[in-house]
């Protein structure tokens, strides 16, 4: 760590401001709290909201894990991890169980989260009603008065057009029977992991200047119809490296002859399974 | 009998200019009130005040609610007023683009109000939507088309279906036939008259087209400069206009 930066880049007053927003978010689960988002040394869309929330929550004792689409080794994850190594000097890890704070983009780790862990989500668009009702004044009013019929119009359109609820990520949820929340673009496969999670979940949207939160053990229900219930979906395969049948998979195109493989999107989980001796169709014994 | 809607001394000003002032009337269940007047006479302002889209500067709009009887909707809590607006009230805009969600299919447009009041069964929402499309003479196979693919007349009929699906008791219509050609107008009027009579709806219809009120309205209010200058039974006002402006209005209708 160099002395050129305050601990975790942001100045202490900014962190206080963000912590106040986080506390308010925790007090009202699912409610979008406005905050004065700062310019960060990375472009919008790279997780500036998540980075600010992480910076405000980090302590020198924390162990940080950063994932992007489940992987620890992709650009976004690597650059944010390096950023905090340089500006906060905290320990980093790739193991979900060792981490006390996990910043994630588009996934929730496969390994069960535990009490005391914090998961920070990077959120591009925090407003679940945005694409149906572009007026921000109107959507705020709808949240205020709990007028959420419009959310079902979106699901209705899905079924009318595709025969099923085709929304595969960003799947809207209702928190504690009150606020409808956009769970950030995690696949709907991960939605059940939000419900009653022992870890604290924080959502930061930098460009949109909103923070919201799910305190531990919050009731989170995915919206659906009585005759078209919510189904967490995944590719109908096992992982080709570790043979896991219960994880979210990425499809990898292997050649131009139609060859493809399916691998766990959570690289840490896949590695642990291979080290424990599980071998998939295309894997080699570790 | 309790009037469904009692309007008492409604006034709306835009700065020093008068939008509408000193408007009072009663509307009984099953009755259709027409409001006519030239452009700028305050009829649309009045309708917006009645429907809660604008806050009037003075006056009361007392609606006979199902739960609590007659309540002033101007001072009513906002959640209750918005609930009224999507259950017991309906508002048909002049331009169907204002009243429809153009990015959502016809079925979704009709179903929105149902989902807003808690319908959560896709099958029943869809069959209700199909039923209503049929009632406004839109073919069932257009249910998944977006309103943008509809003609102006169809869009207007879709807007009417979308509004009537929750069985409202009071319908506000702002120039429902504006911008449609005469044959489409005639069909729409026929449809509206049938629906209003069959469902026993009460309605407040704002228009500058005297033929529309002749067909649909039981009673008529003539507005000029933000004030009501003449009221009465429709046929009486149109056949024997008393006020100079009403006489001008009636004599200005083009004869074919």
Image (spheres, rainbow, N blue to C red):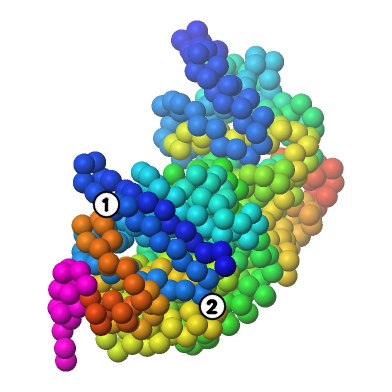
Q: Is residue A85 above or below residue B59?
A: above
Gap in angstroms between the C-alphas marked 2 and 1: 31 Å
Q: Outermost residue, bottom direction?
A: B256
Query: Dot 1 falls on which chain?
Result: B
The x, y position of residue A209, in whole percent, is 47, 33
First reached walking from the N terminus: tag 2 or tag 1: 1
User: Residue B225: which quarter of the image?
Assistant: bottom left
Question: Which range of residues does the magenta coloring cover?
Answer: B242-256
**Side of B173 relative to A48 (left or right):** left
Looking at this view, is A138 or A95 the one in front?
A138
Q: Tell me, for residue B19, which label it has, or none.
A: 1
The x, y position of residue A173, in whole percent, is 66, 50
The x, y position of residue A163, in whole percent, is 62, 74
Q: Say if residue A97 shows up in the picture.
A: yes
Quarter containing the C terminus of chain A: top right
Query: Is B248 contained in the magenta span?
Result: yes
Looking at this view, is B228 or B34 the one in front?
B228
Residue at 71 percent across and 46 percent down: it is A177
Q: Tell me, for residue A249, which label it has, or none.
A: none
Residue at 21 percent across and 41 percent down: it is B16
Query: Dot 2 falls on which chain?
Result: B
Label 2 sits on a secondary structure element that is loop
Label 1 sits on a secondary structure element that is strand
Q: Tell me, for residue B200, which label it has, or none.
A: 2
Q: Is residue B146 above or below residue A99?
A: below
The x, y position of residue A276, in whole percent, is 84, 43
Residue at 33 percent across and 87 percent down: it is B186
Same chain for the residues at labels 2 and 1, yes or no?
A: yes
**Side of A76 relative to B25 (left or right):** right
Dot 1: within a 10 Å radius of its alpha carbon, few (fewer than 14), some, or many (20 or more) residues? many
């Amino acid at each position: 760590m160099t002395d050129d930066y305050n601990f975790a880049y942001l100045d202490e007053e900014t962190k206080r401001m963000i912590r106040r927003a986080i506390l308010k978010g925790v007090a009202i689960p699912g409610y979008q709290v406005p905050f004065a988002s700062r310019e960060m040394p990375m472009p919008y869309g790279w997780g500036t909201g998540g980075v600010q929330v992480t910076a405000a929550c980090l302590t020198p004792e924390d162990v940080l894990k950063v994932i992007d689409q489940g992987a620890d080794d992709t650009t976004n994850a690597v650059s944010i991890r390096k950023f905090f190594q340089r500006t906060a000097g905290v320990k980093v890890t790739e193991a979900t169980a060792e981490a006390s704070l996990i910043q994630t983009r588009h996934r929730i780790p496969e390994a069960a989260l535990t009490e005391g862990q914090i998961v920070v989500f990077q959120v591009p668009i925090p407003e679940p009603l945005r694409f149906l009702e572009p007026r921000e004044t109107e959507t705020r009013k709808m949240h205020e008065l709990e007028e959420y019929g419009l959310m079902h119009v979106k699901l209705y359109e899905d079924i009318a057009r595709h025969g099923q609820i085709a929304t595969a990520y960003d799947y809207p949820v209702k928190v504690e029977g009150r606020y409808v929340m956009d769970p950030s673009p995690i696949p709907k496969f991960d939605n059940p992991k939000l419900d009653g999670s022992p870890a604290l979940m924080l959502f930061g949207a930098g460009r949109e200047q909103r923070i919201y939160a799910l305190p531990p053990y919050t009731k989170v229900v995915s919206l659906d119809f009585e005759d078209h219930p919510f189904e967490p979906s995944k590719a109908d395969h096992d992982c080709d490296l570790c043979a896991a049948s219960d994880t979210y998979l990425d499809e990898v195109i292997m050649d131009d002859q139609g060859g493809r493989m399916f691998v766990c999107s959570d690289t840490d989980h896949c590695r642990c399974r291979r080290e424990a001796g599980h071998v998939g169709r295309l894997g080699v014994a570790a | 009998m309790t009037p469904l809607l009692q309007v008492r001394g409604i006034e709306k000003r835009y700065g020093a200019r008068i939008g509408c002032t000193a408007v009072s009337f009663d509307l009984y269940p099953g009755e259709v009130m027409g409001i006519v007047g030239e452009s700028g006479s305050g009829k649309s302002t009045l309708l917006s005040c009645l429907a809660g889209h604008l806050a009037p500067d003075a006056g009361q709009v007392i609606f006979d609610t199902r739960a609590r009887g007659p309540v002033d909707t101007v001072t009513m809590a906002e959640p209750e007023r918005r609930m009224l607006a999507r259950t017991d009230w309906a508002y048909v805009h002049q331009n169907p683009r204002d009243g429809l969600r153009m990015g959502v299919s016809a079925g979704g447009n009709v179903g929105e109000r149902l989902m807003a009041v808690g319908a959560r069964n896709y099958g029943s929402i869809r069959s209700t939507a199909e039923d209503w499309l049929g009632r406004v003479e839109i073919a069932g196979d257009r249910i998944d088309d977006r309103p943008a693919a509809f003609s102006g007349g169809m869009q207007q009929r879709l807007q009417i279906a979308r509004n009537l699906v929750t069985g409202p008791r009071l319908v506000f219509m702002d120039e429902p036939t504006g911008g449609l050609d005469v044959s489409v107008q005639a069909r729409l009027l026929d449809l509206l008259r049938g629906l209003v009579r069959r469902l026993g709806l009460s309605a407040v219809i704002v228009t500058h087209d005297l033929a529309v009120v002749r067909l649909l309205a039981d009673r008529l209010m003539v507005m000029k400069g933000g004030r009501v200058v003449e009221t009465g039974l429709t046929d009486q006002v149109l056949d024997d206009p008393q006020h100079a402006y009403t006489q001008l209005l009636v004599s200005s209708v083009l004869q074919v």
